[in-house]
Amino acid sequence: MVTASFILLGVFLIIAETTFLQFFPHWLGRPDLVFILLVFVAYKFNWFRGLLLAFLLGWLMDVASGVFLGTYLLLSLLLFAIVKFLSQNSPVKDTACQIPLVGVSYFVVQCLFYLFFSMAQPGALPPWSWSRVLQETIILFVASLPCFVFLNWLYEKISHRHLAVRSMKRRTGNRFR
Amino acid sequence: MRNKTSDRKKTQGFVFFRLFLLFFLFVILVLILLGSTIGGRFGVFHQLSLEALGPAQSFFTQLSLSGARFKDKYIALWKVQEENEQLRLELDTYHALLDEYREAYSLNRYLQSELEFKKRENFPALMARVVGKDPSFWFQTLIVDRGSNDGVVVGMVARTSRGVVGQVVQVASNYSKILLANAPSSAIDAIVQKSRVRGILKGAGEEGYVLHYVLKNADVSVGDSIVTAGIGGVFPSGITLGTVSRVHSNRRGMFLEIEVKPAVDFARLESLFINLSEEQLIIDEMSRSSVSQGE
């Protein structure tokens, strides 16, 4: 139930990013909401469910954006794996470090992405722009705080509801034994 | 006693005399007035009467006018607030209608120009609506609502009345992805329309285009129009690509650095035409390349 809800949310975010969010002026910020969702998934979900979500979101991003198929898929799986690994085996699992990690990981991913393409497909990407990447990182960092609050609230809401339904079912079963 | 009786008689005589005098004066006045009326003449008495009546009339007229003004200014205002709210609502409605008409008008003008373009250019054009845009900074692609069911194949050229938009790179049954001409991986054979100098127009992302391989001694200046050269068969010759926005000559190297502003506003693209005439050409090309790969 939780995984399905987050898949639906991811689909909605991809549609939003490719359609109506495009009309917002760039200075106002068009943060990569799918990226924030992926990092949140890496913090909250277990390996199996997280990888499934990362796979689906990366695959859908490949369909909606870019030219070279598999780019986003690889990127989202790598991002999920690295953030998951860091959040399990380092002080990053502390809540205070989670938000800064979103900004840092976005910046690192952009650098790796550009490095990979400049080696694999030279001239396929526009020239590297520090101002652009830093601006996007700051916007993402600012946006990640309310997004994390919302995603956390949604996660707790759906999880509790799911648990409540399961416990009710169990209790009902015991009554007639 | 006798004195009292004589006083009463005197008083009665005086009253009688006064009444008689009054009656006499009245009769004379009536006679004078009647006399002045005869002949329809607006005489002295009429004039005097009017002079006496005028100020009174003026006073009452002013009074009634003041009353009317008071009614208009204050009493009528009791309903004005209600009327004002109603008028504001009406104004909002009309503003919304006006916005709709303006939008319809601009859409109509846009579609008219596209229709004229379709009639003018003799290629089987398939109109497609832009349904999605690439959110990333790194790639320049669009998703349109036409696919293989409509005859779209990979490699077809997308255009508008303003110029070249790009090329179809991925196709599904009902939707296709178009790589914009300003993508860094896109390269088009182009010429400077004025001097017929050839070069390769490469995409530079949001910066527009850069025209490569134009020699330093070539005649190129800001404002020159850049069009397709028609080499390679994908783009017909003479389609507008953009205008030169900056020409820079480095001390080193043989070529000029030429920046070109795209003719098409990629950020505001709502619809485009896909050139279906190239379907057979592209299919042949693809089959030829697959055969050569097999060998």
Image (spheres, coloured by chain):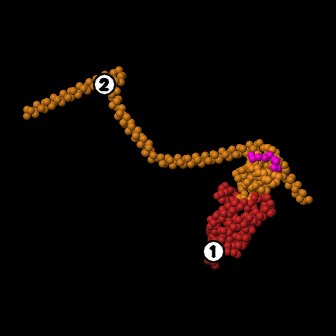
Report the chain shown in red: A
Tell me the shade of chain B.
orange
Please tell me which residue is depicted at 71% across the width and 70% down the height of the picture. Answer: A83
Q: Which residue is mark 1?
A: A167
Marks 2, 1 in one chain:
no
Q: In the orientation shown, which residue stands out farthest toward the top?
A: B39
Question: Viewed as shown, does residue B4 lie left or right of B125?
Answer: left
What span is in magenta? B214-223
Query: Quick check: A11 above or below B3?
Result: below
Q: Which residue is mark 2?
A: B33
Of tags 2 and 1, the one toward the viewer is 2
CA gap between label 2 and label 1 equals: 116 Å
Q: Circle 1 sits in a helix, a strand or a loop, which is it?
A: helix
Circle on res. B197: none
In this rendered view, identify the residue nearer to me: A116 or A144.
A116
Q: Quadrant of the C terminus of chain B?
A: bottom right
Horizontal and vertical percent position of residue B79: 46, 47
Can residue B277 be seen here? The reply is no
Question: Viewed as shown, does residue B54 lie left or right of B18?
Answer: right
Horizontal and vertical percent position of residue B257: 78, 52
Query: Quick check: B231 above or below B35?
Result: below
